[in-house]
Image (cartoon, coloured by chain):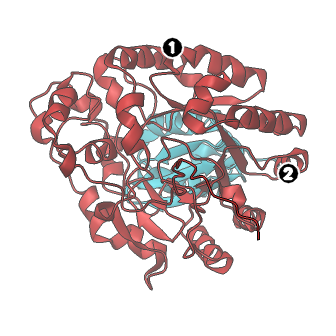
Amino acid sequence: MTVLADQLKGGLEAPICLTWELTYACNLDCVHCLSSSGRRDPDELTTTEAKAVLDELAAMQVFYINIGGGEPMIRRDFFELIEYSINLGIGVKFSTNGAFIDADKAHRLAALDYLDIQISLDGTDAATNDDVRGAGSYDTAIAAMGHLRDAGFDDFKISVVVTRHNVEQLDEFKALADSFGATLRVTRLRPSGRGADSWHELHPTNAQQRQIYDWLLANGDKVLTGDSFFHLNALGEQPLPGLNLCGAGRVVCLIDPLGDVYACPFVIHDRFKAGSVREPRGFAGVWRESDLFVELREPQSAGACASCGSYDACQGGCMAAKFFTGLPLDGPDPECVGGEGEIELAKVQTSTVPRPSLDHSKPVRIATPRVPVALTRR
Amino acid sequence: MLQRALRLDPQVALRDEPFGALAYHYGNRKLVFLRHPDVVEVVRSLDEHDCVADTLTACSIDERRWAAFERAIDSMYESEMLSDRIG
């Protein structure tokens, strides 16, 4: 553990990495959606409220925000808000599925300074991608990338959630990003939101985890990861680039579309809700004083992992991954590379596993057998 | 490096933190941790003095620590957090 990591664990005056999901509305219905998005919530922050939050973030000297959703471009005030943010000196990185980036929007986006775009893509072919993200979503994403390239948008990001089915495509993803003059970003699949239901079938196998680790060691300086694979550090002597720690409530947090503040984007659950930007103490008060964040900044117990020689390397892994698979927070990560997670998972009773607190998924259309209607003539 | 006239790059923002400060470069998006209050003071004062050495003297930095400061400043210059002062 480095001195720096120890200092960061004690918390910062303001987050380094703040994710703000602007809306729960989404045109897609991805099976691993972290925020169970689909339908807009009537209680989402208004334009005025959102601008007040941005004013506060500027006062706290938050350098940049990561905007997501849902699909953030669905909000009618999307451009108004990102332009307001950039004018305050807060850089914007936003994640999108690309459905609303046409040639005009691409030019408008390319004209903005301090703006980064991440287009989500989970397969280098339509079949692999659409299996997870929905029919047509591959073509949509590729079309958006073409518009950004044609508009001269410099160095956008292609953001990939690594699953069992696309691990083999890492080199192809890199080649695709290169072909667009883009940068590849790969992150870890979490059992959060709708991911709670798909994680068991989608998460990489233990053999694939080694493959990811080796690939990241070979390509790590050219690829972004959001530091999300630190649980793999137990696989070897050489740590992956980045901060090797869980940043929840310490260097990162999430503001959800309702203004509620959670410890990280992967834990939308009451257990990890620190407060709301609508409280009189505001976001700054929640960040600096909330009971939850103060608790997360205290030294954490290694618990069941204390006797494992790899704890310094993996730090016990991801809090959200443990929570939503029903594992104790002071035990191994479900994807512990030493296999301890698998042993623990086998003991978990499904009925005790916490469910995400919110679900904005679109109503499931159940195919009902057509009942013949007798037409009668008047 | 010690004789150069430097400044915090105009595209860099500094934010005070319990351990020192964070420096963020809006151009290249690099984030740098300044992990000692003395380093923060030196970086903030560079613009007020003719050269780095004068800044270290003015900030009462013990000469035994100058080599470490030179390395830190060199590294910040490489990452474009510090730039040459013109004129």
Q: Chain of mark 2?
A: A
Q: Are marks 1 and 2 on the same chain?
A: yes
Mark nearest the camera among 1 and 2 is 2
Residue occupying image coordinates x 61% and y 38%: A134
Between A212 and B60, the one nearer to me in the picture: A212
Q: Position of residue A236 (x, y in %)?
A: 31, 16
Chain in red (letter): A
Label located before the other in sequence (1 or 2): 2
Query: Badges 1 and 2: C-beta atoms under 8 Å apart?
Result: no
Taking A269 as reference, is A36 left or right? Answer: right
Q: Quadrant of residue A229?
A: top left
- The residue singled out by tag 2 in the image is A105
Q: Is residue A122 visible?
A: no
Binning the other alpha carbons within 10 Å of mark 1 as few (below 14), some (14 to 19) or many (20 upward) gives: few
Q: Is residue A292 above or below residue B8?
A: below
Lateral position of residue A325 relative to residue A368, left or right: left
Q: Amino acid at mark 1?
A: Ala
Q: Amino acid at mark 2?
A: Lys
Label number found at residue A118: none
Q: Colour of chain B?
A: cyan
Query: Where A320 sits versus B41, above or below?
Result: above
Q: Secondary structure at mark 2?
A: helix
Q: Which residue is depicted at the point 71% across and 21% down?
A: A176
Residue with the mark numbered 1: A218
Residue A86 is drawn in which quadrant?
bottom right
| The C terminus of chain A, quarter of image | bottom right
Secondary structure found at label 1: helix
